Image (cartoon, helix red, strand yellow):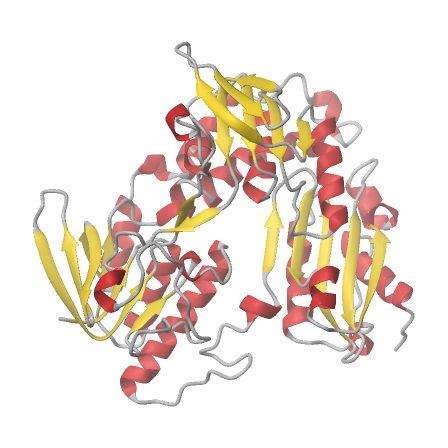
Amino acid sequence: MFDVIVIGAGPVGENVADRVVQGGLSVAVVERELVGGECSYWACMPTKALLRSTAALSAVRRLPGAREAVTGPLDASAVLARRDAFASNWADDGQAAWLDRIGARLFRGEGRLSGTRTVEVTAADGTVTSLTARHAVVVATGSGALVPDVAGLRAAAPWTSREAAAARTVPGRLVIVGGGVVAVEMATAFAGLGSAVTMLARDGVLPAAEPFAGELVTEALRNAGVSVRAGAEPRSVERADDGTVRATLTTGETIEADELLVAVGRTPNTRDIGLERVGLPPGDWLAVDDTLRVVGVDGWLYAAGDVNRRVLLTHQGKYQARAVGDVIVARAAGRPVDDGRWGRHAVTADERAVPQVIFTEPEVASVGLTAAAAEAAGLSIRVVDHDLGTVAGAAVHADGYGGRARMVVDEGRNVIVGFTLVGPDVAELLHAATIAVVGEVPLDRLWHAVPAFPTISEVWLRLLEAYGRSA
């Protein structure tokens, strides 16, 4: 018997376990693969390690004096070896040991709901262990890559984000199906490593971002040698006996490659976790309230991270994990639940202030609403843009620095509800915008937040000047 059972030991499950232990509760954590989950081994960490070398080389090449010291291309084997280190060589000893240190009990195997507050764990040797929770079960099983129903695609053994992140060699030719975050990041990485990359972006590049972000990233990808085919999609795929992949497009054109990466979305890892035992359809996303209790189950089942489809980002899943861990502790102790807007137990930021960085060249950093989303929400907005390349700090940072910044202002409240930056090395500028959005800082007050000179952060001053308000 445990106070809480967590199914899934990725970053979300780990953080739920940590919070409930800190709150004085006992916890069992069930994991069928590696402790640390997708982010540690097949997503955030290894992919950013792949991208960092390309970004560093690009940065050097933008600086006279430094670029002359560069005598050749990236060493692909060294990049892949560094990636392996960041993925802990796909061994989870360290993270499993961390769970033990915090006082969580790890059960390895397939975890399935078997009834109210009960979970059955089937180990690799077939042994079944039944666990019972006094207070709550948390589903933190994440999501997997979606492989669409394209003729021959599954039989062609395509790459998903996992195979791309863990690739042992760099393919000479790579076709990427999709135009979202995974697609553009992997196009950036593999083009930098020497692949001839073709992107089939049916819905365009970064369709959920501000339009200028997709435009600037598309331009940069093409400058890097990537063939970006907006509006293109495969009708069928086949892999020949020699390993060559042939994708026939809806136009009838055929493209050949050594590997094909599918990056068109995610699907919830809920098909085989026993949802039918508690009256929920297997394979679906789990709808939750703002304290992450699963809708349709009587108060004891929670879902955090990708699996609830609120925001499919690791850092946002960890934010949810902290909230759900704390609210389980509060409810177990009979303490009040703070579930109002921006309350400790409510995941308000999921809808109002989600930060995201896309590690392309240039980087895309955003938080809050796009202009289109703000208008769709019925806000009276004003959009202010500024050319990042005209900021003094950007000119010092790199010759020919190009980029753009946008703030979306809610005119009714005089606060920023959305902010997007596109340019080299803008990721570290994002948290200032996140604080402004979460804190709902009035623009008149932001005038007193003076950016240091010469830094790229001076764009804040330029945006406020363009907006036309003064202290």
The residue that appears at 80% across and 49% down in the rendered structure is: 404
For residue 364, above or below residue 169:
below
Residue 379: percent from the left, percent from the top? Answer: 74, 73
Q: Give the percent coordinates (x, y) of residue 100.
A: 22, 58
Apparent side of residue 137 relative to residue 242 in the rendered image (left or right): left
Q: In this view, does 173 lie to the left or right of 230?
A: left
Whether residue 213 is situated above or below residue 355 in the rendered picture: above
Q: Does residue 79 appear anywhere in the picture?
A: no
Q: In which quarter of the image is residue 464?
A: bottom right
The answer to which quarter of the image holds residue 185 is top right
Q: Nearer the viewer, residue 206 or 220?
A: 206
- Residue 239 vs 205, above or below: the answer is above
Residue 26 position within the rendered picture, expressed as x and y whole percent measured from the top left: 21, 71
Q: Residue 380: image x %, image y %?
A: 79, 73
Image height of 260 relative to 218, above or below: above
**Residue at screen point 61% across, 67% down:** 353
Which quadrant of the figure contains the C terminus? bottom right
Camera sees residue 287: yes
Judge by depth and name the residue closer to the eye, 202 or 293: 202
Residue, far left: 127
| Residue at image location 46% in from the left, 75% down from the top | 290
Image mark count: 0
The residue at 78%/57% (across/down) is: 406
Instruction: Please tell me which residue lies in front, 113 or 41.
Output: 113
Q: Quadrant of the N terminus?
A: bottom left
